[in-house]
Image (tube, rainbow, N blue to C red):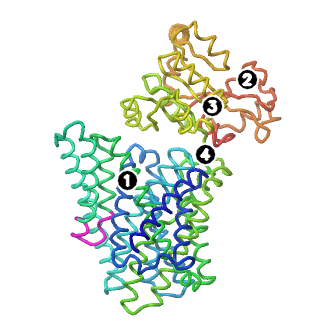
Amino acid sequence: MLVATVALVLALGVASRVLADRLRIPSVLFLIVAGIAIGPEVFGFVSRETFGGGLSAIVGVSVAIILFEGGYHLRLAKLHESPTALFRLVTVGAAITWLGTAAAVVVFLETSIEVGLLVGALLIATGPTVIGPILQVVTVRDHVAAVLEGEGILNDVTAAILAVVVFEVLIAGNGTPAALVGDFVLRLFIGLGFGAIIAGLVWLVLDYGGSRPCTAPLHARLIVLAGIVVAYAGAETIASETDIAAAAMAGFVLGNVDLPYHEDVIGFLDDLSVVVLSFVFVALAALIDFADIRALGLAGLAIVVAVTLVLRPAVIYLSTTTARFTDTERLFLSAVGPRGIIPASVATLFAVELQALGRPQEAQLLAGTVFLIIFATVVLQAGLARQLAQYLEVSPMRTILIGGGRVGLSLAERLEQDGENVLLVDHDPDAVKEARKRGLTALEGDGTDADVLESAAADSAKTVIATTPDDDVNLLVCQLAKTTFDVETVASRVSQPDNVGAFESLGVSAIDLSMATAWSLENVIERPSLSAWMNERGRTGDVQEIEVTATDLVGKTIADLNAEIPDGVIVGLLTHRDGATEVPTGDHQLRDGDRVTFLGQTTAVDRAVKRFHPHD
């Protein structure tokens, strides 16, 4: 019976993932619905007794794998995208969420402060189990993704350790606040330290292990898997609930060193995490007791409102005060904070512990509140994340570059500096590896293959640029982009001047490298100041172009526009709908379809663009 149940859970998990990918809806929504369907509330295939005492161990190892994989993808370069916002979120933001949630629980449910603090600690966590599936179907700018991913990993660790410390010190024991802080810091230090040590050992084994080339990738995957389990179990042996911190830290360290067979390990971890995430989410969703949730009544709904509509926006707005975050990005972050595996798994454990302590009402309150928040945030926030992103227009359309050579890499980095959502595609694994080292998003594959372009989401791309040194390859890429995927803007590098006509006949913007080089050299000679300034673009100055639309600038004059843009930037050019370009006077009136070029200091240009086109 147990084998059949496990098979059913896995089958539903995989089916949920496939369905989610097809519909472009975060998979956690389907996973939790599938779990409820096979649980006691509907068909009754799964109950708390189904897995016996082994469920906590299965969930624990699965969570360790998921957090390790999340930590492995959490590169230092990504954290540097928004270090201030992320630091505030995982420190002051976590404290506000903890204490604010605790206050709401105490006030609305009239329970003890200790139980309120326990519930608040559990609900600090968002986690990669729910954030990862959202980011697979919702494209956001790197600094927004970095905040969501970093918060998920770091606050999962904080929530797991803090909840255990609150329970052991304030509920099961008679400890003081000072003892709570000391115990938390000690466990966090043990977990992070042990995880770093295991990561170092794994790296040494892989770097100096001397496996045969034919078996080395397999050995790398197995050694990494063993490292996850050792980090998890070893830390737990030293001190309870340090295992989560150890697994996340081990993944983070290994993901930020030059690990042998890195691509093989990434693929293995991605596949493994999909399987365990599917199993764990369905299994835990099956254990939701709706009687506990219904018992909360209107007080439960009040807590949901407090957590999602009061505390989350307050934390986000206090943390994302830099100009880099637009108002709509802050709204999106405020509306996306779903809770996942950590609160569900630990709440199940503590409910049992409270029952054993003779406090069944508090056990029911704990389980009901945590699962209500999980259910509400997964259904509403994760389920509607893509629609919300589209409504708020925080999903920038993708720019796809085919070719990861010197030209492609340089262009990709410059476009990233301009805030574009860049994906680089190359068939050479070394080129892909180099791109990822530079913090770029890269896909290994043949850019002339329609299936590869489809997997790169070329059908929804804003721009496709072919940058390989082979004109035939570039021409084929451009043909596919234009005819198969109907990409609006297609451009290409052209090595042989005689081939420019073939590209232009397709409606492709062709850049003849010989002419481009000649133009650059002419600028150096004839316009040295402008050339030097343009070469510093991204550091001191910038040039950006926006399109005039009916909702922002139509009917205004250049003088009106100058009055609204910040100091340090000017309107350099005006391009009319018919393609004519001129240096405008203040009396020029803007029409729908005109294009305005801003020129000036980088930060000033960026503010000017965001003022009128905050999502470009």
* Three-letter code, disc 2: Thr
Nearer-the-camera pick, 255 or 84: 255
The answer to which of marks 3 and 2 sits earlier in the sequence is: 3
Mark 1–mark 2 distance (CA, rounded to whole Å): 48 Å
Q: Position of residue 116 (x, y in %)?
A: 47, 80
Say which residue appears at 36% left-offset and 80% top-offset. 167
Q: Where is residue 171 in the image (x, y as percent from the top left)?
A: 36, 85
**Residue, disc 1:** 69
Q: Is residue 184 above or below residue 614?
A: below
Query: Which mark's residue is nearer the viewer, 3 or 1?
Result: 1
Q: Position of residue 459 (x, y in %)?
A: 62, 37
**Residue, disc 4:** 395
Mark 4–mark 2 distance (CA, rounded to whole Å): 27 Å
Query: Which mark's residue is nearer the viewer, 1 or 2?
Result: 1
Q: Do the residues labelled 1 and 2 touch (CB within 8 Å)?
A: no
Mark 4–mark 3 distance (CA, rounded to whole Å): 26 Å
Query: Which mark's residue is nearer the viewer, 4 or 3?
Result: 4
Mark 3–mark 1 distance (CA, rounded to whole Å): 44 Å
**Residue, disc 3:** 569
The answer to which of marks 4 and 1 sits earlier in the sequence is: 1
